Image (tube, rainbow, N blue to C red):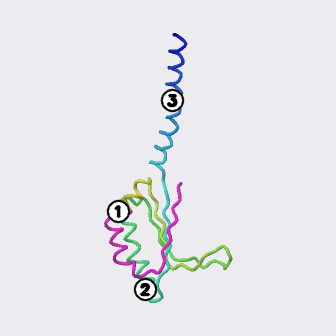
Amino acid sequence: MNSRRNFIKTLGVVSAAATLPINTIANEMANQKMIHQVYFWLHDNANTNEFLTEAVPMLGKCPTVAKFIAGTPADTEKRDVVDHSWQVSCTIFFDSLEDQLAYQKEPLHLEFIDKYSSMWSTVKVYDIAI
């Protein structure tokens, strides 16, 4: 009888220990910082300067954005691995995956899409966990 109780106690400890890593991983993912990189290929008739100075900065004003950088392709040497085909890019830093999710629904982000999406022909997003 005593060995059965010890066995059941051991199962409880093993079960709790197995749950601990799952909870830890879930907590770490909830606190995962990330970088959201967005590349825009504008239509030929789009005003790149307007898009860079008026449109894209709207995204940096969203409340969950921790840091925001926007720019154009650097005038680096032409190499097979370097893509200079886009016109404007922004890099947005978030303190958590939840902040990035909230950003997707943020009225200012949605206004940016509604107001300026006609200026781009293609947009590509690369999300990076840090």
Which of the 4 image quadrants contains residue 60?
Answer: bottom left
Is residue 74 rendered to the left or right of residue 113? Answer: right
- Depth order, front residue of 127/88: 127
Q: Is residue 109 left or right of residue 27?
A: left
- Disc 1 to disc 2, C-alpha distance: 26 Å
Q: Regarding mark 3 in the picture, which secondary structure is present there?
A: helix
- Looking at the rendered structure, the kind of residue marked 2 is Asn
The residue positioned farthest toward the bottom in the image shown:
45
Mark 1, residues whose alpha carbon is within 10 Å: few (<14), some, or many (≥20)?
few
Q: Is residue 105 highlighted in magenta?
A: yes
Q: Which residues are magenta?
A: 104-130
Whole-angstrom CA distance, mark 2 to mark 3, is 60 Å
Q: Residue at x 36, y 73 (%)?
A: 112
**Where does label 3 land, which residue?**
15
Q: Is the residue 10 above or below the residue 33 in the image? A: above
- For marks 3 and 1, the one nearer the N-term is 3
Disc 1 vs disc 2: which is toward the camera?
Answer: 1
Q: Earlier in the sequence, mark 2 or mark 3?
A: 3
Whichever of callouts 1 and 2 sits on the residue coming sooner in the sequence is: 2
User: What residue is disc 1 on?
Assistant: 105
